[in-house]
Image (spheres, helix red, strand yellow):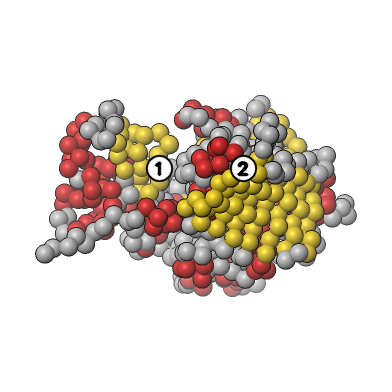
């Protein structure tokens, strides 16, 4: 008797696992509910918490409501009223569109919705426990929607254990409410916790008014607005005296996001950037790819160059206005004769590990991106200020003037390290999550047969397919989902698939097979790393450095070559005998 070692997970288990991608903790549930209320056109949103959301989260709005008959549908996965087909993704103006939030929350909590639309004579109520609908009935309700989530993760003990203290969750939820108030100034947001009123914000004429109420209006806030073609940018800066951190909150088309382009545009101004920044960018929806992150916390710009320029220019202007700008140092042209003819360089004894900015003390930005910076409160990030990109030297090395010293960086080695760690991060998880492709990709004819043959194995790796002959499917063979492994951005779905098939072919031992495939992806991705001689602009260079800093072992590439050499201020002083 050979009982199968591999079993398909029960639907209720699978949906709880999937829910974990979207709902990480109370604040992520609150964020999704708030987004839904904003999308519903509400002008008044109340957030009522118990124990910072750990025991209960209620979000009430006066928006459009949900029809009684459609309530069960709203709880289904991938059910949304916000997009109809794939082309709509290029013009989404709503915060939601994935149709995953309610179903995810329903799977891991006790959830109740009460709602009434303006047209209907009666409203409705629906209850769902651990993904199972337990009640659905008509009743009178106030116009709008009230969604209550109790006992989050009651059926996911591992997650429950990792919830932070109520005060931590509460702080983060307040931050989310504040941020949405800034982006939607006309909407009033109120938060109460354990019966106490905590926040009442918004219902104002403009974002500037809301910001003034958050930051206080003591004349320290500076503001600029810039419009370039279809892009417009509003930016606020408050360089509070004595501030030791840099907090950047950015919104793109009303969506609060983390974005490396915006961050590096600020940190590469060359000024002292300590304090709070709010960046609000409006761009044509088709220039922004919103669909790259399950919690929608990251986006990708089709063209990031102009956005960097614009943000960098505006940031410099703000620093100028607030007096925080240090003038650029100009370097004189070299003398025509060679005074260095007989120069003997002093020996370099460079202890990289002690000079490289160490993670804990630089606070914030160098936390692992997932858990630290992407957490909803983490729209705020911190950075060492005063990093300037000086350019490239000696065949392509990047040169920076950094708070920690003069830095030379090998862009190829650095990029290899970044790619490698992004992929390695996925190695750590025994099961790779799967990311649904918004546009299914055709499977090339040459490998269609192998795909059909290895389908089960590929499925376990996170791929999914629609193949001719599948129940009710009569289209061509397509890839519908991919392993969600970061760092493989440069590989196309077909390349990933090809390389997986080759790995499966090569390694017949199932226990070693996944590793073999991952290694192939890592190697293919590394081959694509930027080359030493490539010309790098300021934006790319700053982004590369920032990403490198977030690596666990930033000092060397996966092959052991150094990525960076620092000449610390002290070292330079010694050298110059100062
Ligand atoms: P998404 O927001 O991505 O569409 P959700 O799972 O968050 O997906 O919500 C599913 C659907 O439920 C929404 O598309 C919307 O039609 C409806 N809905 C959810 N919350 C509200 C609300 N507060 N007011 C009106 N409709 C809502
Ligand atoms: Mg939603």
Q: Is residue 541 above or below residue 403?
A: above
Residue extending farthest right? 218
Q: Which residue is mark 1?
A: 436
| Residue name at image x 59 percent, y 69 percent | 164
Q: Is residue 358 above or below residue 486?
A: below
Q: Nearer the viewer, mark 2 or mark 1?
A: 2
Query: Quadrant location of residue 52?
Result: bottom right
Q: Quadrant of the N terminus?
A: bottom left
Query: Quadrant location of residue 115?
Result: top right
Q: Please provide percent x and percent y for residue 92.
A: 57, 33
Residue extending farthest left? 1
Q: Is mark 2 within 8 Å of ligand 1?
A: no
Q: Which one is nearer the viewer's eye here, 389 or 424? A: 424
Q: Please provide percent x and percent y for residue 17.
A: 42, 57
Say whether disc 2 or disc 1 marks the residue closer to the N-terminus. Answer: 2
Q: Is residue 369 above or below residue 158?
A: above
Q: Please provide percent x and percent y for residue 540.
A: 52, 45
């Amino acid at each position: 008797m050979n009982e199968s070692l591999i079993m398909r997970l029960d639907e209720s288990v699978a949906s709880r696992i999937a829910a974990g991608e979207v709902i990480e903790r109370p604040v992520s549930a609150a964020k999704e509910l708030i987004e839904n209320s904003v999308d519903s056109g509400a002008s008044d949103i109340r957030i009522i918490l118990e124990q910072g959301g750990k025991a209960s989260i209620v979000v009430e709005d006066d928006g459009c409501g949900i029809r009684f008959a459609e309530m069960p549908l709203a709880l289904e996965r991938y059910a949304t009223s916000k997009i109809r087909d794939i082309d709509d993704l290029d013009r989404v103006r709503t915060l939601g569109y994935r149709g995953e939030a309610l179903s995810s929350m329903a799977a891991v909590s006790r959830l109740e919705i009460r709602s009434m639309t303006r047209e209907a004579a009666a409203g409705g109520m629906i209850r769902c426990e651990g993904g199972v609908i337990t009640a659905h009935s008509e009743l009178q309700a106030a116009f709008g929607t009230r969604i209550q989530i109790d006992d989050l993760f009651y059926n996911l003990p591992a997650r429950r254990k990792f919830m932070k203290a109520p005060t931590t969750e509460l702080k983060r939820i307040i931050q989310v409410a504040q941020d949405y108030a800034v982006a939607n100034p006309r909407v009033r947001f109120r938060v109460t916790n354990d019966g106490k009123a905590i926040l009442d914000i918004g219902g104002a004429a403009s974002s500037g008014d809301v910001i003034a109420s958050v930051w206080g209006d003591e004349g320290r806030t500076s503001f600029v607005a810039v419009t370039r073609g279809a892009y417009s940018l509003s930016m606020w800066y408050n360089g509070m005296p004595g501030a030791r951190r840099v907090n950047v909150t950015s919104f793109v088309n009303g969506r609060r996001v983390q974005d490396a382009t915006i961050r590096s545009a600020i940190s590469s101004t060359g000024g002292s950037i300590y304090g709070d920044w709010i960046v609000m960018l409006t761009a044509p929806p088709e220039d922004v790819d919103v669909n790259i992150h399950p919690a929608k916390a990251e986006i990708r710009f089709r063209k990031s160059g102009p956005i960097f320029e614009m943000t960098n220019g505006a940031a410099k202007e703000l620093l100028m206005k607030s007096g925080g700008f240090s003038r650029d140092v100009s370097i004189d042209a070299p003398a025509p004769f060679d005074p260095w003819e007989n120069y003997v360089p002093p020996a370099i004894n460079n202890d990289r590990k002690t000079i490289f900015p160490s993670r804990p003390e630089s606070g914030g930005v160098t936390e692992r991106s997932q858990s630290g910076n992407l957490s909803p409160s983490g729209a705020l990030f911190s950075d060492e200020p005063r990093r300037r990109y000086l350019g490239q030297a000696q065949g392509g090395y990047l040169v920076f003037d950094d708070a920690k010293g003069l830095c030379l960086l090998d862009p190829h080695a650095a990029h290899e390290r970044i790619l490698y760690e992004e992929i390695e991060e996925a190695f750590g998880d025994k099961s790779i999550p799967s990311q649904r492709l918004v546009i299914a990709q055709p499977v090339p004819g040459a490998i269609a047969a192998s795909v059909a043959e290895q389908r089960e194995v590929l499925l376990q790796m996170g791929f999914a397919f629609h193949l001719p002959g599948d129940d009710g499917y009569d289209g061509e063979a397509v890839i519908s989902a991919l392993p969600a492994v970061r760092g493989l951005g440069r590989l196309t779905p077909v390349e990933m698939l090809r390389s997986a098939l080759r790995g499966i072919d090569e390694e017949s031992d199932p226990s070693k097979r996944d590793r073999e495939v991952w290694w192939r992806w890592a190697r293919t991705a590394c081959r694509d790393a930027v080359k030493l001689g490539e010309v790098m602009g300021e934006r790319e260079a700053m982004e590369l450095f920032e990403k490198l800093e977030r690596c666990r072992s930033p000092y060397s590439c996966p092959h052991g070559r150094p990525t960076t050499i620092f000449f610390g201020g002290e070292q330079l002083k010694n050298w110059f005998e100062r």
